[in-house]
Amino acid sequence: MTVRVGVIGAGTIGQDHIRRLSQSLSNVAVVGIADVDRARAQSIVDKTPGAHVYTTGQDLIAASEVDGVVVATWGPAHEEFVLAALEHAKPVFCEKPLAPTTDACLRIVQSEVARGQRLVQVGFMRRCDPGYLAMKAALADGKIGSPLLVHCAHRGPSSPPMFSSDMLITDSAIHEIDLMRWLLDEEIVAGTVLRPRRSSRSPADLQDPLIVLLEMQSGVLVDVEVFVNAEYGYDIRCEVVGELGTLALGDTSEIVLRHAGLRAGHVPGHWIERFVTAYDMEMQAWIDSIGTGQAVGPTAWDGYTATAVASACVTSLESGVRTPVHLESRPALYANT
Ligand code: NAP
């Protein structure tokens, strides 16, 4: 079966998803692309045989030729398109965040619960990264005993224009927020955000870096350094400290160069490069799930929870104090996810 996909939002990640869907993955064809910038959508369609432009995301969702919808617009537009996909009973892959507010996320959750069927997969692709998958398997092995602490770093070379301090949490650390829930298999109960010395090389109005401290239900403490103008590359680190040992993400460099008395490896320059395998795997899993009719991967509930934790952390960024996370009760639809 070839799954016919429509993509709404042809910006940075939308274009990368269109490339993987049309060139790398199996059993899928991109048939439609919509973007508020029609010329941008047309330029991508011109490079995507078999696809054509839809004037609006709503038209694309309603089209009978579209089996599944990818939402890759900016966050505030996600809710409208995810809800429309649910109304048309179409599987929808929504980039993170599911929506920028917990109220918007809950409207999506309620719509899916009312249908009684999972149709939403959220783009928390790190759950498909081979390194994190190996860490999760090693934790389950029990070799390092119970986890006590996790140290994470989320560094990027430079922030895009208009990037604000709260976006270090809602755009960047939200990946670690989802990942820690998945890796440790427990909820985050509170967040505290600390403001270290600012980098003089970051935009003047940006508090960069930040330390985001997450408290897990069991008492495990997770510190996340978020530094989006680290200049030297896109560098993601994670180390779990357990009672009997530690587990850390491996070095991502494919080769190590030894030359003239120095030893050097490669640091990725962009998240597209660092997580290419994870993006491929999450999207192939979504395509395959449309074939089987059984949704997989991060749920709308995971999307809601990540936004709830990120919101608590933004409150802490503003107030400077520890902020508890408030979560609604988990609906039965998500009981085993
Ligand atoms: P981007 O480059 O700004 O692309 C977004 C695109 O959507 C732009 O072309 C934008 O047009 C278009 N758009 C906005 N509102 C729309 C609407 N109502 N209907 C149709 N098109 C619309 O942003 P991006 O970096 O690709 O990010 C897109 C989403 O992916 C965000 O939610 C972001 O958080 C997420 N993301 C996830 C990852 C990940 O690792 N999973 C990585 C990067 C981004 P205009 O530019 O004209 O507004």
Image (tube, rainbow, N blue to C red):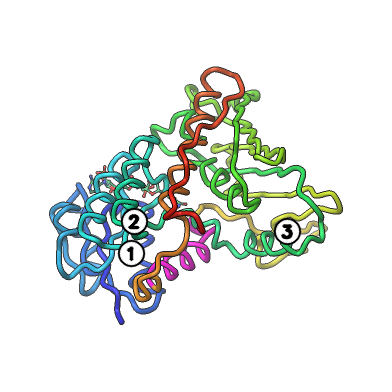
Which is nearer the eye, 222 or 22? 222
Q: Is residue 303 left or right of residue 114?
A: right
Q: Name the disc covering residue 18, or none.
A: 1
Residue at horizontal 39 percent and vertical 32 percent from the top: 162
Residue type, numbered disc 3: Leu
**Residue bounds of the magenta highlight:** 272-287
Residue at horizontal 63 percent and vertical 36 percent from the top: 214
The relative height of residue 274 versus residue 1 in the rendered view (above or below) is: above
Q: Do the residues labelled 2 and 3 touch (CB within 8 Å)?
A: no
Which is nearer the eye, 164 or 294? 294
- The quadrant in which the N terminus is found is bottom left
Q: Do the residues labelled 2 and 1 touch (CB within 8 Å)?
A: yes
Q: What element carries label 3?
A: helix
Q: In this view, does 48 lie to the left or right of 120?
A: left
Labels 2 and 3: the sequence-earlier one: 2
Q: In this view, does 219 lie to the left or right of 38?
A: right
Q: Mark 3 points at which residue?
A: 139
Q: Name the disc covering residue 14, or none.
A: 2
Q: Does the magenta stretch include residue 54?
A: no
Q: List x then y, in percent, for residue 71.
A: 31, 54
Q: List x then y, in percent, for residue 192.
A: 61, 27
Residue with the most extreme bottom position? 1
Residue with the most extreme right position? 244
Note whether ligand 1 is within 8 Å of mark 2: yes
Q: Residues within 10 Å of mark 1 (few under 14, many from 20)?
A: many
Q: How crowded is mark 3: few (under 14 residues within 10 Å), some or many (20 or more)?
A: many
> Could you say which quadrant of the image residue 249 lies in?
bottom right
Q: Is residue 284 magenta?
A: yes
